[in-house]
Amino acid sequence: MPSAAETEKDRHMAIKIEKNIVGYGIKKDDEDAQAAAPAPPKRVGMHEEIGRPEELRGSTYKIKTPMSEHALYITINDIVLDPGTEHEQQWPFEIFINSKNMEHFQWVLALTRVISAVFRKGGDITFMAAEMKQVFDPQGGYFKKGGKFMPSLVAEIGDVLETHMKKIGLIEPDELSAEQRALMDDKRAALEAHNDSVAAKADATAPTDDTSGEAPDYPPGSQLCRKCNVKAAVVLDGCLTCLSCGDSKCG
């Protein structure tokens, strides 16, 4: 049996090179360990070849507009992509819209099939919400409870899509900074103190119908914000500021 000294000597023996050297590199000690380590799971993502599972997660949203006696119920079913990995993502797979009102049945059915097809196509699907929210009804829109303006029924369906995509993490939620919240609180407090008597009179004469467009959480006489479509924009110190989203003409 060779001794330890002989083994060390054999390890450092010269090796005769019989071919031309065309390249070289320094082998690191951890390269063998990295080669033996299992490769990280590959991200699959959504594509058309993914079939519908037996079970999907679903969320149902209710829409009640002043344009119809019956409410619409929007159900969005989600599939879980890359489960158990760092890329795990809940993804919309299909959408259904149901109502007792059959007036819009034809185009609503067509819309749900198109949206579901886009869901299963993969890629960026967040654009649908933005595009649908820009659809205007030639007969005029309406205000939701709370004062948010909806230019059409299609726009409200798009608003539901955006809400759902924020819920599952496909769209980053709009969050105001602490400075913006503090500024809005200061403006709101100053406005309410300045117009206390006027606000009390306006509250006494304001209609109570939900479709009036008057937001109960914002000062009477607030204007419609062009950014978030909520009647929450007030003028103070010559600057129009939205008390809902923080948008300000003064920057």
Image (tube, rainbow, N blue to C red):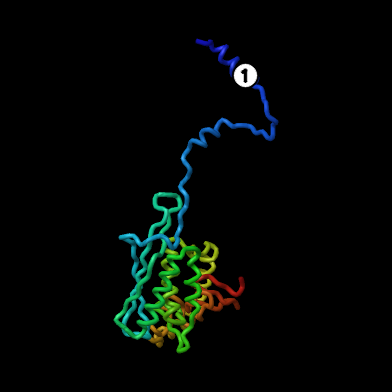
Determine whether the residue tagged by mark 1 lies in a helix, strand or loop: loop
Question: Whole-percent x and y of residue 208?
Answer: 36, 84
Position of 56 relative to 233 (above/below): above
Residue 233: give x, y in percent of width and height: 52, 77
- Quarter location, residue 44: bottom left
Q: Which residue is mark 1?
A: 12
Residue 209 visible: no
Side of 31 where 199 appears, left or right: left
* Residue at image point 68% right, 29% down: 19
Residue shown at the point (41%, 83%) measured from the top left: 203
In the displayed image of the protein, which residue is found farthest to the front? 18
Q: Position of residue 133 (x, y in %)?
A: 48, 76
Q: Nearer the viewer, residue 209 or 2?
A: 2
- The furthest residue to the left: 100
| Residue 17 seen anywhere in this rendered image of the structure | yes
Q: Please name the residue shown 55% across and 74% down the image.
A: 241
Three-letter residue code for mark 1: His
Q: Position of residue 41 (x, y in %)?
A: 45, 47
User: From what the image shows, is residue 182 above or below residue 227?
Assistant: above
Dividing the picture into quadrants, the one containing residue 168 is bottom left
The foreground one among 135 and 212 is: 135
Residue 90 sits in which quadrant?
bottom left
Q: Quadrant of the C terminus?
A: bottom right
Other residues around mark 1 within 10 Å, as few (<14) / some (14–19) / many (≥20): few
Query: Hey, which residue is sitting farthest bottom in the picture?
Result: 139
29 vs 171, left or right, is right
